[in-house]
């Protein structure tokens, strides 16, 4: 199993628009199609945000998440990871609404720790919310993908892990190069990796032009990798990606050339400790 690499496709995120790249998916059908195509290209996991189908603006509606989940599950067995970042949610019930995707019982949900400046906004994750979110995922048997944007987030996750908040093994996504988290450099990635607890699994993403260097490092260091429109819109300088699947295929090819074998969905389940739903 050690040589296997799990590829995640983050197919839409909340920031990229069709103006930036016409292939960015908005509707549940487009998002599910992008996930399924990415699966055929080598992705074992789809990381999913939802958009207002008409305007493409970030949305956070249970029925949109459900439609994407159902559409993917109708067509393939890939693992589905729904976001709980809820960036566009405001008001006193925002924390609870962020956990609505967990109740749909996807295979995984992203889990954010620590508050930070995120581009031009503040990404608010009170410690009490992260603890509650972890407990909610544990109760629903949804695997958390612990997103960490700087080393303090890892410390917080290790503390939660010590208190039994995660089913083993904890799974980290090292998010490199988000303004104003840690920068995407070789030194930073090595530093982040060295802070991880020994019994965890990890993946890495790089934002924009850092995507290729960061996933290359991830492949070489024995980690897992994430690509897709949420992180990057180009296959190389000045050349927009035609699809998420194109980026996944490139990542799979790179991993294979560097001696890693691309994990199937069943292998990814085994690596991450995600039992098949009965
Ligand atoms: Zn995301």
Image: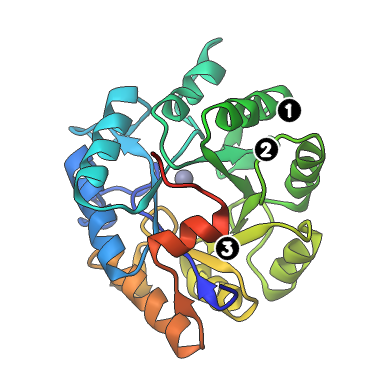
**Residue receiving disc 3:** 204
Element carrying mark 2 = loop
**Residue receiving disc 2:** 113
Q: Characterize the local packing of mark 1: few (<14), some (14-19) or many (20 or more) Cα atoms within 10 angstroms.
A: some
What x and y, as percent, mark residue 244? Answer: 30, 62
| Scheme by which the image is coloured | rainbow
Mark 3 and mark 1: span between their CA atoms? Answer: 23 Å
Find out whether the residues at labels 1 and 2 contact each other: C-beta distance under 8 Å: yes
Residue at 51%, 88% in the rendered image: 259
Find out whether the residues at labels 3 and 2 contact each other: C-beta distance under 8 Å: no
Mark 1 and mark 2: span between their CA atoms? Answer: 7 Å
Which quarter of the rendering shows the N terminus?
bottom right
Nearer-the-camera pick, 153 or 67: 67
Mark 3 and mark 2: span between their CA atoms? Answer: 16 Å
Q: Is residue 104 left or right of residue 94?
A: left
Q: Is residue 131 left or right of residue 51?
A: right
Q: CB at mark 2 closer than 8 A to ligand 1?
A: no
Does residue 233 sit above or below 30 in this rendering?
below
Q: Is residue 222 visible?
A: yes
What x and y, as percent, mark residue 201? Answer: 64, 59
Element carrying mark 1 = helix
Residue at 39%, 66% in the rendered image: 264
Q: Characterize the local packing of mark 2: few (<14), some (14-19) or many (20 or more) Cα atoms within 10 angstroms.
A: many
Q: Of all residues shown, which one is farthest toward the front?
A: 278
What x and y, as percent, mark residue 44? Answer: 39, 60
Q: CB at mark 3 closer than 8 A to ligand 1?
A: no
Query: Which mark sits nearer the N-terminus, 3 or 2?
Result: 2
Q: Quadrant of residue 263?
A: bottom left
**Residue receiving disc 1:** 127
């Amino acid at each position: 199993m050690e040589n296997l690499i799990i590829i995640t496709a983050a197919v839409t995120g909340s920031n990229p628009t069709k103006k930036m790249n016409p292939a960015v998916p908005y509707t549940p059908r487009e998002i599910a199609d992008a996930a399924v195509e990415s699966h055929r290209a080598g992705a074992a996991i789809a990381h999913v945000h939802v958009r207002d189908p008409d305007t493409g603006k970030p949305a956070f509606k249970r029925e949109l998440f459900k439609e994407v989940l159902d559409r993917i599950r109708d067509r393939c067995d890939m693992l589905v990871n729904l976001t709980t970042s809820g960036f566009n949610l405001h008001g006193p019930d925002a924390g609870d609404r962020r956990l609505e995707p967990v109740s749909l019982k996807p295979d995984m949900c992203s889990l954010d720790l620590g508050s930070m400046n995120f581009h031009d906004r503040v990404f608010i994750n009170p410690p009490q919310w992260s603890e509650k979110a972890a407990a909610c995922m544990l109760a629903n048997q949804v695997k958390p993908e612990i997103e960490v944007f700087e080393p303090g987030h890892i410390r917080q996750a290790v503390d939660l892990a010590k208190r039994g908040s995660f089913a083993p093994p904890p799974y980290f996504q090292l998010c490199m190069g988000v303004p104003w988290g840690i920068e995407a450099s070789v030194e930073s990635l090595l530093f982040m990796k060295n802070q991880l607890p020994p019994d965890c699994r990890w993946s890495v993403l790089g934002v924009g032009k850092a995507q290729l260097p960061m996933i290359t490092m991830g492949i070489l260091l024995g980690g897992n990798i994430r690509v897709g429109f949420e992180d990057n819109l180009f296959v190389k300088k000045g050349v927009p990606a035609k699809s998420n699947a194109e980026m996944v295929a490139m990542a799979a090819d790179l991993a294979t050339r560097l001696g890693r074998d691309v994990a199937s969905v069943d292998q990814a389940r085994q690596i991450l400790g995600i039992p098949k739903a009965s």
